[in-house]
Image (cartoon, rainbow, N blue to C red):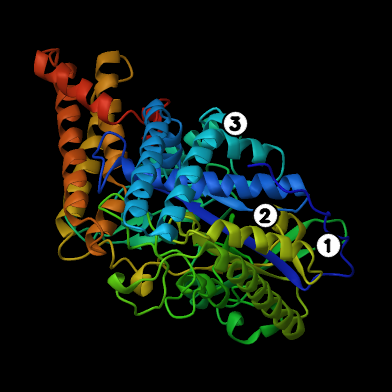
């Protein structure tokens, strides 16, 4: 679709009250070659068609019309591996063509029964999927590359993360936590052509340095590295947490900058955050340097703003619940298209009214204006109270915009347009904000996540305890083989060890526990965890056998080939990632 040109935003008058950073987190577990529907590759196809291509169109349209679109976007490494995989690039167009054909069949059905409005919607779906197909071809079937070009041109900023969304607070060994980060950063750098400056912590889950007792298998207390230390070692400068971690922060020090621009660290008392209101300790509107050890801090943490985020997330007041928007849960057939609107928060699926596209424009515009007004009010209150330039950080799962909320990408475009003309708000990427407004305080953060309860209870339950027992034993076995087997001098051992390493990374994905606890795909979560655990054991057995001069029998060779075909990820994997 050709972007509509418009008048560039006017020059800003006066100093803004503060900044705004929109942060989108894009993630899907490895689903290629692991099922189709309802759980499997269709997840990836839907995300590409409903979120990534529409979001790309929004960003490109804003750039074309001169509207700044300083989006900070996290395309998670395991998602990048899939978007760049030939299997996705070949099968996604076929799936879109099938969706268009489904719309043609629906049009015929609706026309035959005299429902001309639904027939109109079906024709609208056909044109939509055909346009998506043309868009996909126009970027060389390379969604990740298209976003990377926008980042290299300075329009957006890209984030990295753990390789497979491994849940950092519950990873057993520091070596395995580091490998998750190193593998993720390597993938991001290979695909983007540059190393991102910031990271999205899987599930926004943070762990500080210090003594820790594993919850299963091992009963010893061990000292482990903090998240900020592990990421800092890889050149990452900032990450995000949920608001409650800032509320529990402990003051550690102040960063003072002299006239020549040199910064110094001054230690303060742990209670200073409770009485020094002028420096805005613990405020989610301020960046904080993080240190688990009392020093000056190496990474910056930014916190989600609850009031702003709930405008979208809240089940009670969130914009996606507007009755005029497309209903996500009702489809025409098991894999069918959507033809109905939300209608009402408590309306049964059978009573949903047909979708009316013409009603949506007003809703999107009104709610985008309201969202900007909320951001402006929050920043102005902070400026009035502290005299400081604050920042509203609004992190969301990217799939909310387009997949779960069909009109979400249009909403984002209107938000960017409105902010471009609002002198009180400075929309910016996170790196640009930190360069202009470096943090002046250092804190120690408590452990936690943005999951239910703010802790680890989504991922460690009685039902899931066995998965962590199995994962810990896998970590133990892999690190033992790394020290014991001659992989550095025997390429055949190295080949099997790399297969085991890939399966260990996939085994550690937080998604398997998440879909079990949330009941989103219980059987699929258990099956995928068990499959990767079995593949890890098979590859490890081959590595052990080859170290002894065997492992070349037909079954062993077929098992390694099966692993390679199903899980062709991280082609540049290095076993050195698990070394200190």
Q: Nearer the viewer, residue 115 or 236?
A: 115
Sequence order check: which comes first, mark 1 or mark 2?
Answer: 1
| Badge 3 element | loop
**Residue at point 23% right, 40% down?**
35
In this rendering, position of residue 342 left or right of residue 279: left
Neighbours of disc 1 within 10 Å: few (<14), some (14-19), many (20+):
few
Check disc 1 and report the residue beneath it: 258
| Badge 2 element | loop
Sequence order check: which comes first, mark 2 or mark 3?
Answer: 3
Check disc 2 and report the residue beneath it: 429
Image coordinates for residue 232, horizontal then vertical, percent:
54, 48
How far apart are the alpha carbons under marks 1 and 2?
26 Å
Q: Nearer the viewer, residue 229 or 340?
A: 340
Image coordinates for residue 343, horizontal then vertical, percent:
42, 74
How far apart are the alpha carbons under marks 3 and 1?
36 Å
**Residue at point 15% right, 62% down?**
463
Q: Is residue 119 above or below residue 381?
A: above
Q: Residue 456, located in which quarter of the rendered image?
A: bottom left
| Quadrant in the picture for the C terminus | top left
Check disc 3 and report the residue beneath it: 193
Neighbours of disc 2 within 10 Å: few (<14), some (14-19), many (20+):
many
Q: Of circles 3 and 1, which is in front?
A: 3
């Amino acid at each position: 679709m050709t972007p509509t040109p418009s008048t560039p935003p006017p020059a800003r008058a006066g100093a803004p009250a503060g900044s705004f950073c929109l942060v989108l987190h894009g993630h899907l577990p490895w689903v290629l070659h692991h099922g189709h529907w309802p759980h499997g590759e269709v997840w990836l196809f839907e995300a590409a068609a409903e979120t990534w291509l529409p979001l790309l169109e929004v960003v490109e349209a804003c750039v074309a019309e001169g509207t700044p679109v300083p989006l900070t976007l996290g395309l998670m490494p395991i998602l990048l591996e899939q978007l760049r995989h030939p299997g996705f690039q070949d099968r996604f167009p076929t799936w879109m063509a099938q969706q268009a054909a489904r719309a043609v069949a629906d049009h015929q059905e609706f026309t035959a029964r005299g429902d001309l409005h639904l027939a109109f919607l079906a024709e609208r779906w056909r044109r939509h999927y055909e346009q998506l197909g043309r868009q996909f071809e126009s970027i060389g079937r390379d969604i990740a590359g298209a976003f990377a070009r926008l980042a290299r041109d300075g329009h957006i900023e890209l984030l990295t993360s753990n390789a497979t969304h491994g849940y950092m607070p519950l990873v057993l060994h520091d070596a395995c936590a580091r490998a998750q980060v190193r593998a993720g950063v390597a993938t991001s750098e290979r695909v983007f052509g540059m190393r991102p400056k910031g990271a999205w912590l899987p599930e926004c889950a943070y762990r500080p340095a210090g003594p820790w007792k594993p919850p299963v298998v091992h009963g010893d207390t061990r000292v482990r590295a903090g998240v900020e230390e592990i990421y800092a070692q890889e050149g990452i400068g900032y990450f995000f947490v949920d608001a409650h971690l800032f509320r529990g922060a402990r003051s550690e020090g102040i960063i003072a900058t002299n006239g020549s621009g040199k910064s110094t660290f001054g230690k303060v008392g742990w209670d200073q955050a409770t009485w020094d209101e002028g420096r805005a300790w613990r405020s989610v509107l301020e960046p904080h340097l993080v240190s688990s050890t009392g020093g000056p801090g190496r990474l910056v943490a930014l916190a989600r703003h609850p009031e702003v985020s709930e405008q979208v997330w809240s089940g009670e007041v969130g914009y996606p619940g507007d009755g005029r928007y497309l209903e996500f849960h009702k489809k025409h057939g098991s894999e069918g298209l959507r033809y109905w609107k939300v209608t009402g928060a408590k309306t049964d699926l059978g009573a949903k009214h047909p979708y009316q596209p013409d009603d949506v424009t007003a809703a999107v515009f009104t709610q985008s204006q309201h969202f900007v007004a909320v951001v402006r009010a929050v920043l102005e209150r902070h400026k009035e109270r502290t005299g400081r330039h604050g920042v509203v950080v609004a992190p969301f799962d990217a799939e909310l915009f387009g997949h779960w909320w069909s009109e979400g990408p249009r909403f984002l475009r209107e938000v960017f347009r409105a902010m471009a003309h609002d002198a009180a708000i400075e929309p910016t990427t996170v790196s640009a904000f930190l360069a202009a407004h470096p943090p002046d305080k250092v804190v120690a953060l408590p452990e936690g996540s943005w999951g239910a309860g703010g802790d680890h209870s989504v991922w460690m339950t009685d039902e899931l305890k066995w998965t962590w027992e199995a994962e810990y034993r896998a970590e133990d076995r892999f690190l033992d083989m790394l020290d014991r087997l001659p992989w550095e001098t025997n390429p055949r051992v190295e080949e099997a060890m790399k297969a085991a390493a890939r399966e260990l990374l996939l085994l550690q994905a937080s998604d398997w526990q998440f879909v079990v606890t949330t009941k989103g795909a219980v059987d699929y979560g258990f099956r995928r965890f068990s499959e990767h655990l079995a593949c890890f054991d098979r590859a490890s057995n081959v590595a052990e056998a080859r170290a002894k001069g065997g492992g070349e029998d037909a079954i062993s060779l077929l098992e390694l080939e099966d692993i390679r075909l199903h899980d062709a990820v991280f082609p540049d994997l290095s076993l050195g990632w698990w070394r200190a």
